Image (cartoon, rainbow, N blue to C red):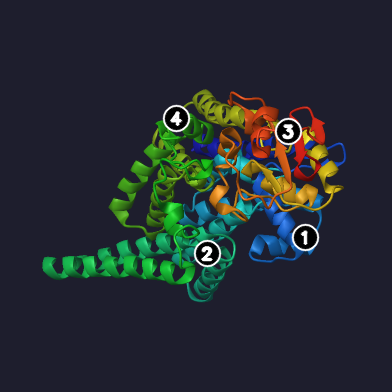
Amino acid sequence: MQNTAYRVQWHWWYTAIAAAAGIITRVALPWHSVFDNGIVKFNTVDAYYFLQQAKLGNITDLWTWILSIFNNEIIAAILPMLIYLCCIPIVYCIVQLIFKNSLMSGISTSLFCIMPGELQNRTALGAADHHALEIIILLLAMLSLAIIIRSKNWYRLFGIVALLSLTLAYYYTWGGWLVVVAIIGIWLSIIIVEKIGNLPYEINGFATGGFILVILLTIVITELFIFQGFHDSILHNLSWQINTTVNEEMPLLYTNGMLDLTVWMQNYAMLFYPGLLGLGILMYDWYQDMDKGKLLLIVWSVVLLVLTLAQRRWTYYSEINIALLTGYCAWWFLSRFDLRKITIIIMACIIFILPVEQGIMMGLSTNGYIPDEMHNSLVWLKQQPNGIVLSQWDNGYWIEYYAGKQAYATPGGSNKDQNRKEITALFETGIEPDNDYRYILLDRRTVEGLSLSPDAYISRLWNNQAVIPVYSNQDIKIFDMEEN
């Protein structure tokens, strides 16, 4: 009994320390990268798309609408971190509702706070795209479902209304919203199969197969009618894109078609193994009592892990599940084995140190932020006459936000979509693209690995005539067609 009381006491300290570590890696470490000499920088290029749309009043989704309300770069940079802080009690409540165990809730919440990788990256200071909003909406949807499972009467009605409202909010946030429908559909299917398990075998099999078929057809038909296309749909977000050149669409274990475990290690920090063990233990425990709450966590976790294997963009979701499953695994061992205090402390430190170490490295990284020379170049370009800017497609949102000019191609495929990833190839081969652009902007990413100098292959676009950049700043060069 004394050992149990000790465990209940230490896990609150563990949770507090983990939450503090999460704030340090998300706020303190990237602070100077985000707020740099009076400039607010964001750590993803997509953030600039939403900021630009909010500035122009093009409200097409929930996140843009939120940004347009404040219309402030500093608030936009802080919002993802505030969302992370709000997620902490939500995660605790989900585990507490399902398992009614404060020790497990504390451990799971602690691991959520210190998970590195995309979960940290999407909820850190300066991550002003819609992913943090997606995370909290999905967590609130799962909390609503847990309320429906564990509550009665008006509380259950509240959970149903909240779940429907959150699904609608998710729909207006991102095209992957049907993942909520998939989780609920599979969860309900298994419950119904279990309920009709006492029927004769033939009826049972027929009813089960028919019900699952109806669920799948409903999801597909809804998908086709709502999105009316493959690229922006959840079908595209779920599909195996092993040969894609878009980083977030690559499978978790493959990069550019080659087996690569780097992303897997960066996101889960060795916690994948106890998480997977926890999933196996949870499945066994559920089989013993058929508890609907345990089934929810199983279905939620399996769906997200399968999606993550298909496309790494789902890692910032599945990291949450790995944290919860690892918490379940830790609780299972602590509740069954009379471990000494020193053993518990050593285990806690090992689980704590590995994710935090990677989180610190990520927090100190300057990858993703606009370089100073690029920012200064675009500020200069903003003062020049209007014209379309031809550049590597990853620079598109920066060009539109800072230079106030239309980019030839952007990461989202706007404008000259057919050439978005082929811009570098155009420069290298000298093939003339549509000539409705005026400026050409080159940077290190565009010319790295090419045999010709920037001036040499740019001259190909002017029929091998010598060209002179109108602006140069370290690796950045800007050419003006009307000046050559």
- Spatial CA distance of label 4 from label 2 is 35 Å
Determine the CA span between mark 3 and mark 4. Answer: 26 Å
Please tell me which of labels 2 and 3 falls first in the chain: 3
Q: Amino acid at mark 3?
A: Leu
Which is more N-terminal, label 3 or label 1?
3
Residue closest to the eye, 128 or 455: 455
Q: Residue 287, position in %: x, y? A: 29, 52
Which amino acid, mark 1? Answer: Lys
| Amino acid on which disc 4 is placed | Leu
Q: From the viewer's perspective, tell me whether residue 142 is left or right of residue 70.
A: left
Per the image, label 4 sits on a secondary structure element best described as: loop
Of residues 186 and 10, the one nearer the viewer is 186
Number of numbered discs present? Answer: 4
Q: Residues within 10 Å of mark 2 (few under 14, many from 20)?
A: many
Q: Which residue is mark 2?
A: 144
Which residue was labeled with disc 4?
261
The residue that mark 3 highlights is 29
Residue with the mark numbered 1: 55
* CA distance separating discs 2 and 1: 34 Å
